Image: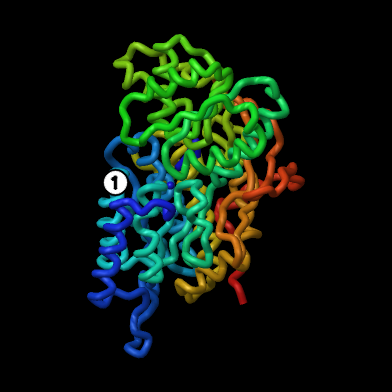
Amino acid sequence: MRATPRPRAVTRAVLAGLVASMVLSACGAGGRPDAEAGGTEIGVTEDTVTVGAHFPLTGVAAPGYSEIPTGTKAYFDFVNAQGGVHGRTIEYLYKDDAYNPTNTSQVTNELVLSDEIFAMVGGLGTPTHSAVLDFLHDNEVPDLFVSSGSLLWDQPDRYPGTFGWQSDYEIEGKILGKYLAENHADAKVGLLLQDDDFGEDGEKGIRAYIDSQVVAAQRYAPTANDITPQVSALRDAGAEIVVGFTVPSYTALSQLSAQRLDYRPQWVYSNVGSDSALVGSLLARFSEGKVDDASSLEGALTTEYLAGVEDTDDPWVRLWQRVWAEHRGDGELTNYRIYGMAQAYTFVQALQATGPEPTREGLVRALETVGGDFAGPTFAPFRYSADCHAGVSGVRVARIVEDGTEVLTPVLLTDNGDAPITEADIEHAPPPEGGIPDVEPMN
């Protein structure tokens, strides 16, 4: 996805989530049914497995992100139409949190305690999902594939049931930093950062390679409605390249601010905020139609870990086209819907590996045991193991052009910290015939 989420600072929302979890625990809410009473695993029947997620279906973050669960549902419906997984169909519930952590706590409580989901799959957002980490852990709910590249999701000792999915922001920053160091070694670089773990992790990665080139770092609150002061400060610092770890709305605002200031740096955007079609539509909206949206990000650099909707020759994109044609909701296939389908594909693999009698414990063990070997739509493999719950291990660098992207590097792999960056040496395999994975159950 040109897609996308602190224990370092305990926010009011996190505290609210902790209080809610303690209250619910005191009321007897637990993660497992009473085996002696003959109960089955929560969220599992003879015919169904129920999973859930929270997304901003309304509010400032809804553009783009609200499309992700429609893609997820389409792929689950595709699998269900062919018999489901081990004879069970996947029931998928997703609820609106409007990108508000307080709402996230409320809808997550509903999903866990009222809807009795087997697992959380793909809950979106760093500030939102961090508010429910402890609640999901306390209730023993597998918390899979958080839709965010924060490093928070890779804490297997503290949160053994939580797993990331996409490339995290630190390794994305490292790969972008290395590319700039090799191709723009003399350029002055400015950073435009969301003021949370998204921006902090991205900055950590990029400074590992170009710290000496950074002349300014500006941060914005994700509640701001104008970032002209930040963009103006980057211009005044002489930044010739601006690297933005921004969500789509703030990518659009940065472009609008730069146009007003007649500031024309080389833009570099995190995958999260670089969907050209969405940013263009937001630009048109924010400018009340005064800015042409057709070429809003043309020439900007970004990263990719999935083939985009414009790449119609890619066999995975052809599969997603088929899925959307057969099980579509409203609208067209987008990169956000592809992101949701790709996450759903990974969950089907995990459920297959768990076996015909799925348990929450077995689902987590399957990811830790064989999840690192899953082949699928992502360009790079996952890093899953008992010691690592981080997601995709790399990205490639690309330039946004009129009809999609121009690939600038091979797929580059790395890990957090001082791990080196290497080229992927395995060809990306096409999807299996029929479009459904076939993972053997664990013994």
Q: Is residue 105 left or right of residue 336?
A: left
Q: Which residue is mark 1?
A: 100
In the image shown, does 410 or 260 lie closer to the viewer? 260
In the image shown, does 205 or 142 lie closer to the viewer? 205
Q: Could you tell me how many numbered marks the image carries?
A: 1
Colouring: rainbow
In the image shown, does 282 or 50 lie closer to the viewer? 282
Q: Position of residue 103 (x, y in %)?
A: 26, 51
Q: Position of residue 234 (x, y in %)?
A: 49, 21
> Which residue corresponds to the image point at 36% horizontal and 70% vertical from the top-left?
139
Name which residue type carries label 1.
Asn
Q: Quadrant of the C terminus?
A: bottom right
**Residue 281 seen from this side:** no
Query: Tag 1's secondary structure?
Result: loop
Q: Quadrant of residue 329?
A: top left
In the image shown, does 425 or 323 lie closer to the viewer? 425
> Which residue corresponds to the image point at 43% horizontal and 45% vertical from the top-left?
71
Q: Is residue 274 above or below residue 439?
A: above
**Residue 209 seen from this side:** yes
Q: Is residue 191 above or below residue 315?
A: above
> Which residue corresponds to the image point at 57% horizontal and 30% vertical from the top-left?
302
Q: Is residue 212 left or right of residue 127?
A: right
